[in-house]
Image (cartoon, grey):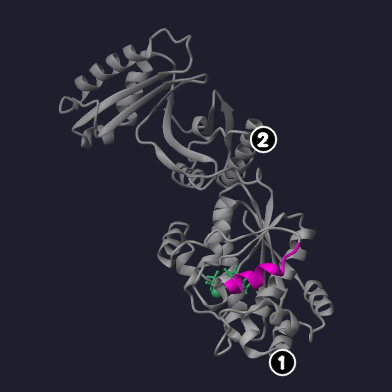
């Protein structure tokens, strides 16, 4: 009995999006996610994708977990593949779902005959297999409305497939079908969730992190790398840009009014991220800002931050979320425990005592005039280090 993973594409065929582009990206992302686990065949037919291990010791638990993190899949199942005969279907179902059927009180059979050459129709498959399972597991009874176990049988191109529960996929759209965005990544809770949320919509990520050594440590950088590894389990591999930010922060601290420090710093981050995005052929910026969360995230402050970016949209996928909602996602994608490690971020190093919560753009721009912005940004970009993330 061969176990495979069966992924249905029915629900995820999108309006207006080219089906082949979508399917090719999904196959590519699945193959990449599964490659480290050993030899496997990933192929599509009849609006389904089949993940077929080529070795008997293939780690199906890990494979199923990885499939569950590939965007573009709503539901999938681990299934056993048998010959297309009723004998094989009866024997396969009884063996493959034995444990679940032993524990259950009620069950039903769902049958689908995608291969119309198969001589037995769906209602007959249900009746025959149902009767056979009742004979083999006499403690069971049939409940078509709320069964403990549903025995699914699908007669398809390459064989007959039997599976129990459907698993929930990560949803979303395959990464690589929606362009590219540069995402500003701190070591906090919010920005990794923002990155994941945008990747879920099919977008490839170019992460950008601002570091201020010696005020920020190597451990803080490693934390960002660790967070991005978690995100890359969903989004695929990416290349982090680490931007040296110390000189700019020191200049702001010396040359600008203290209450405008944070907003001017954030504008510099956006301007540099915009240049990085342009070079990386990205079409948008992403931040983890959420309205009202801190002084720099009032409407007025976000307005001033936004104005610094001239050539592309800035996405803030968390803008309307409460911290609780953000934390729920952070736990789900397993970034939370890393995010709460207490290493300093460049934002927390120079924090004004009384930040201006309603900055007025005119004064902010005037304060910035004292600095040689072009030279500072050019030096920061010159000092960028790249770190590859993900398998
Ligand atoms: P986070 O939890 O993502 O750190 P936050 O609630 O702490 O967010 P801020 O520190 O004000 O909020 O940062 C707002 C956004 O600015 C972050 O979500 C992130 O997108 C970006 N950002 C902040 N610090 C950095 C940094 N050192 N490098 C890159 N981006 C940063
Ligand atoms: Mg932060």
Relative depth, front residue between 216 and 263 = 263
Please tell me the numbered disc located at residue 254.
1
State whether residue 330 is above or below residue 70: below
Range of the magenta residues? 300-310
Query: Where does the image place residue 179, in percent across and percent down from the top left?
Result: 69, 48
The question of residue 303 being in magenta is answered with yes
**Figure quadrant of residue 152:** top left
Find residue 209 and report its image quarter.
bottom right
Q: Position of residue 212 (x, y in %)?
A: 67, 81
Crowd tier of the residue under label 1, counting other residues whose Cα lies within 10 Å: few below 14, some 14–19, many 20 or above: few
Q: Is residue 131 above or below residue 163?
A: above
Residue 59 numbered mark, or none: none
360 up-or-down from 199: above or below:
below
The dominant secondary structure in magenta is helix
Left or right of 183, for residue 165: left
Extreme residue toward the bottom, this view = 254
x and y, in percent, of residue 269 in the image: 69, 72
């Amino acid at each position: 009995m061969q176990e495979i993973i069966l992924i249905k594409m029915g629900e995820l065929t999108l309006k207006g999006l080219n089906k082949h582009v979508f399917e090719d990206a999904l196959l590519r992302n699945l193959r990449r996610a599964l490659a480290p686990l050993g030899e496997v065949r990933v192929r599509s037919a009849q609006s389904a994708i089949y993940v077929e291990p080529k070795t008997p010791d293939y780690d199906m638990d890990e494979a199923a977990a990885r499939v569950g993190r590939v965007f573009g899949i709503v539901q999938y199942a681990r299934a056993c593949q048998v010959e297309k005969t009723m004998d094989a279907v009866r024997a396969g179902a009884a063996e493959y779902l034995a444990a679940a059927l032993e524990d259950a009180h009620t069950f039903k059979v769902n049958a689908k005959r995608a291969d119309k050459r198969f001589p037995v129709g769906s209602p007959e498959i249900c009746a025959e297999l149902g009767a056979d399972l009742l004979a083999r597991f006499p403690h069971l009874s049939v409940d078509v409305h709320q069964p403990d176990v549903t025995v699914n049988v699908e007669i398809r191109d390459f064989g007959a497939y039997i599976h129990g529960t459907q698993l929930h996929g990560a949803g979303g759209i395959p990464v690589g079908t929606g362009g590219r965005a540069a995402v500003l990544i701190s070591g906090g809770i919010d920005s990794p969730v923002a990155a994941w949320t945008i990747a879920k919509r099919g977008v490839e990520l170019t992460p950008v992190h601002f570091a201020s050594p010696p005020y920020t440590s190597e451990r803080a950088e490693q934390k960002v790398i660790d967070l991005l590894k978690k995100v890359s389990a969903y989004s695929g591999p990416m290349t982090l840009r680490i931007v040296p930010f110390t000189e700019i922060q020191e200049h702001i601290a010396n040359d600008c009014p203290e209450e405008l420090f944070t907003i001017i710093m954030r504008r510099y981050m956006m301007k540099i991220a915009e240049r990085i995005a342009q070079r990386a052929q990205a079409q948008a910026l992403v931040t983890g800002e959420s309205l009202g969360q801190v002084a720099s995230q009032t409407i007025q402050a976000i307005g001033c931050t936004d104005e610094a970016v001239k050539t592309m949209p800035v996405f803030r996928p968390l803008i309307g979320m409460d911290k609780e909602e953000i934390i729920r996602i952070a736990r789900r994608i397993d970034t939370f425990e890393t995010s709460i490690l207490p290493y300093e971020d460049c934002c927390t190093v120079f924090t004004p005592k009384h930040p201006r919560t309603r900055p007025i753009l005119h004064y902010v721009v005037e304060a910035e005039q004292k600095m040689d912005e072009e030279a500072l940004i050019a030096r920061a970009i010159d000092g960028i280090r790249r770190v590859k993330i993900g398998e």
